[in-house]
Amino acid sequence: MSNVVAFPRSSVPRWRAEVVYRSDLGPLEIVHVFEEIEDLAALIEHGPDWRCMVSCEITLNRSGKEFATLTIEQAAKL
């Protein structure tokens, strides 16, 4: 069983974290979307008890075409 709850903080948040917790009804998945990676700590602390956390997967939430071919060398010049 899986529930999904999203907490957007901007129109196009940069990051997405999928956090899975143990519950009596089975795994509970909570999805957080946020702009700054440092915001994740507060989101975790305000969610279900962190001691019940099974996993947390953080991915880039933006998929704009301007990033599709950008390399670290090119980004350094911006």
Image (tube, helix red, strand yellow):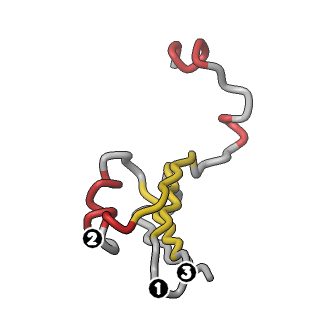
> Looking at numbered disc 2 in the image, what kind of residue is underneath it?
His
Reading the image, the residue beneath label 1 is 24
Identify the secondary structure beneath mark 3. loop
Q: Earlier in the sequence, mark 2 or mark 3?
A: 3
Separation of residues labelled 3 and 1 (CA atoms): 6 Å
Separation of residues labelled 2 and 3 (CA atoms): 20 Å
Identify the secondary structure beneath mark 1. loop
User: What residue is drawn where x is 51% and y is 67%?
Assistant: 31
Give whichever of 34, 10 is nearer the camera: 34
Disc 1 or disc 2, which is closer to the eye? 1
**Residue 73 in the image, given as x and y percentages of width and height:** 59, 12
Numbered circles on residues, count: 3
User: What residue is drawn where x is 56% and y is 47%?
Assistant: 59
Pointer 3 local density, CA inside 10 Å: few below 14, some 14–19, many at least 20: few
**Residue 7 in the image, given as x and y percentages of width and height:** 43, 71
> Looking at numbered disc 1 in the image, what kind of residue is underneath it?
Asp
* 57 up-or-down from 10: above or below: above
Identify the secondary structure beneath mark 2. loop
Residue 26 bears which disc, if any? 3
Residue 46 bears which disc, if any? 2
In the rendered image, the quadrant that contains the N terminus is: bottom right
Residue 73 bears which disc, if any? none
Q: Quick check: marks 2 and 3 in contact, CB under 8 Å?
A: no
**Residue 45 in the image, given as x and y percentages of width and height:** 26, 64
Pointer 2 local density, CA inside 10 Å: few below 14, some 14–19, many at least 20: few
> Looking at numbered disc 3 in the image, what kind of residue is underneath it?
Gly
Separation of residues labelled 1 and 2 (CA atoms): 20 Å
Give whichever of 32, 23 is nearer the camera: 23
**Residue 39 in the image, given as x and y percentages of width and height:** 31, 54
User: What residue is drawn where x is 45% and y is 80%?
Assistant: 23
Pointer 1 local density, CA inside 10 Å: few below 14, some 14–19, many at least 20: few
Quadrant of residue 67 in the image? top right
